[in-house]
Image (cartoon, rainbow, N blue to C red):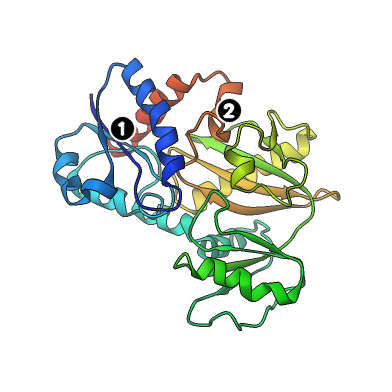
Amino acid sequence: MHVILIAGGWSDERDVSLSGARKIRAALDELGHDVTFFDPADDFKNLLAVARGADFAFINLHGTPGEDGLIQAVLDKAGCPYQGAGAGPSYLALNKAAAKEVFEAHGIKTPDWQLVTPTQGRDTALELPLPVFVKPDKGGSSLGMSLVRRAEDFPAALDKVFAMCQSALVESFIPGVELTCGILGNTPLPLIMITPRDGSDFFDYENKYAENGAEEICPAPVDEELSRSIQEQMLTAHAALGLTGYSRGDFIATRDGATYLLEVNTLPGMTPTSLLPRAAAHVGYSFTNLIAELIRLGLERAA
């Protein structure tokens, strides 16, 4: 097939996107596809025309555009199938506050939260007990995130997010173990336990992508009941958001066994250190076979 590999873009996660694209390109070549690389940051106005001449698009974008559904909407107009969620569900999942409303409506616990918009400004009162996380409402890779322990640091954390032209999601800090669960097709993958490196308050950008980053254990060393509960919650969230193909959700499990879903990623990372490929490998998927399966699922969705 003629596959366009869409990566790069203009979000703060551009470098992560390009890093993953290199490995995806190698897999697509190994599968025998005719691959055209397309960076919307350089040639967005030609996306519709390029997509009309392709058999499939493999999207490896993070943030905006990509996870916000814009690229998917253009591909839909071109009649070009692609892997993963459609435009509407992509936008819903990327908007953390909206996604949390969906989680809560379906009985899935998520940390208490507050949305602060730039219109409200840095002097907005904090409605949650400290400590809290402050993060961009739409974005990933933990960019722009702060852990606020003192009330006087709250305005600066908001400024950090507003400088990224974002609204800020303020979220209660839940002490516990971070676990991530991927979905492939309609099947949950093994959980991965994430332990940030010494000196880190949370699973930040360096923990995610540096070679000496967080310890990631797959399968997670948790009891079967907890693992099954999180997998079932992730399947519920995946369906409730209208997602297809694959996704990955981040959870916190407390010492007393309570679990909280933080967010769901519709275009999970595909770098050499990424979580979903690691979980898929544990159930027998090589990276190349994972790419092939995502293409199969995308074509099945479009049929």
Answer yes or no: do the residues labelled 2 and 1 have beta carbons within 8 Å? no
Could you classify mark 2 by the number of other residues whose Cα lies within 10 Å: few (under 14), some (14-19), or many (20 or more)?
Answer: many
The residue singled out by tag 2 in the image is: 278
Assign the N terminus to one quadrant of the image: top left
Percent across and percent down for residue 98 are 51, 64
The residue singled out by tag 1 in the image is: 299
Residue in the foreground of this view, choosing between 220 and 7:
7
Write the residue at 38% across / 21% down: 27
Q: Secondary structure at mark 2?
A: helix
Q: Disc 1 marks which amino acid?
A: Leu
Look at the picture and state if 246 lies above or below 163: above
Percent across and percent down for residue 215 are 71, 34
Sequence-first disc among 2 and 1: 2
Q: Left or right? Give the position of 186 relative to 132.
A: left
Is residue 76 visible in this depiction of the protein? no
Q: Secondary structure at mark 1?
A: helix
C-alpha gap between disc 2 and disc 1: 24 Å
Assign the C terminus to one quadrant of the image: top left
Percent across and percent down for residue 271 are 49, 32
Q: Disc 2 marks which amino acid?
A: Arg
Is residue 225 visible in this depiction of the protein? yes
Write the residue at 65% across / 53% down: 261
Look at the picture and state if 81 lies above or below 237: above
Residue in the foreground of this view, choosing between 290 and 164:
164
